[in-house]
Image (spheres, rainbow, N blue to C red):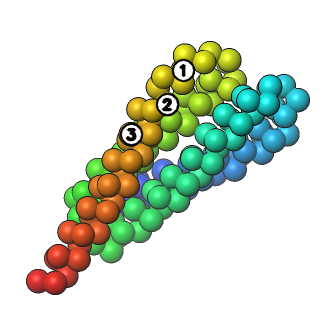
Amino acid sequence: MASRQTLLCAALLGMMAVMLGAFGAHALSNVLELRMQQVYQTAVQYQFWHALALLATGILQRVCDVSLLKVAALLFLAGVLLFCGSLYLMALTGIRQLGMITPLGGILFILGWAFLAWSVIRLEKQQDR
C-alpha cells in the first residue's frame, strides 16, 4: 500500500472509530447487554489505536522507502477488518462463534507491529551506511 493509501485508510478508520464509538455509547447503550457493550467498546478502541498505527506508518512511508512498511500497513488494515469487524458483528448479532475470527485479526496486528519494528531497524541500517 502506498503512503497516500495508508494515510487515507488511517483517516477513514479514525473517523469511523469516533462515529462507531459515539453510536455505541448513545444508540446501543440500552440495546446491548453489558458484556456485548464491552466487546463493542474493545473493537472501537483497537480500531482507533490501529488507525493511529496506520497514520504513523503512512508518515514513515513518506519519509523513507522501506517496502516492509507497505506490508505493515496491509497487516494493520487486515487486522482491523478481522479483529474489530468480528467483534462489531458479534456484539450486534449476538453470534458468539464470530469470536473465533478475532484471534486471527490479533495475530495480524502483532505481525503489523513486528513489520513496523523491522522497518525501523532496516531504516536505521540504511542511514548508518
Query: Type of residue at label 1?
Result: Leu
Q: In this rendered view, identify the residue nearer to me: 5 or 74.
A: 74
Q: CA distance from mark 1 to mark 2?
A: 7 Å
**Pointer 3 or 2: first along the chain:** 2
Circle 1: element type: helix
Circle 2: element type: helix
Q: Quadrant of residue 108?
A: top left
Could you tell which of marks 3 and 1 lies nearer the N-terminus? 1
Badge 2 is on which residue? 102
Element at label 3: helix
Dot 2 amino acid type: Thr
| Residue 65 appears in the rendering | no
Q: Mark 3 sits on what residue?
A: 107
Give the farthest residue toward the bottom.
Answer: 128
Q: Quadrant of the C terminus?
A: bottom left
Tell me the crowding category of disc 3: few under 14, some 14 to 19, or many 20 or more residues within 10 angstroms, Cα based. some
Which residue carries the number 1 mark?
A: 98
Q: Residue at x 42, y 46 (%)?
A: 109
Crowd band around label 1 with a 10 angstrom C-alpha radius: few (<14), some (14–19), many (20+): some
Do the numbered discs 1 and 2 sit on residues whose CB atoms are within 8 Å? Answer: yes
x, y (%) of residue 35? 73, 29
120 lies left or right of 38: left
Q: Position of residue 58 (x, y in %)?
A: 40, 62
Residue 54 position (above or below residue 88): below
Give residue 88's quadrant in the image: top right
On screen, residue 126 versus residue 120, left or right, reads left
Q: Residue furthest right?
A: 30
- Percent from the top left, x then y, of residue 106? 44, 39
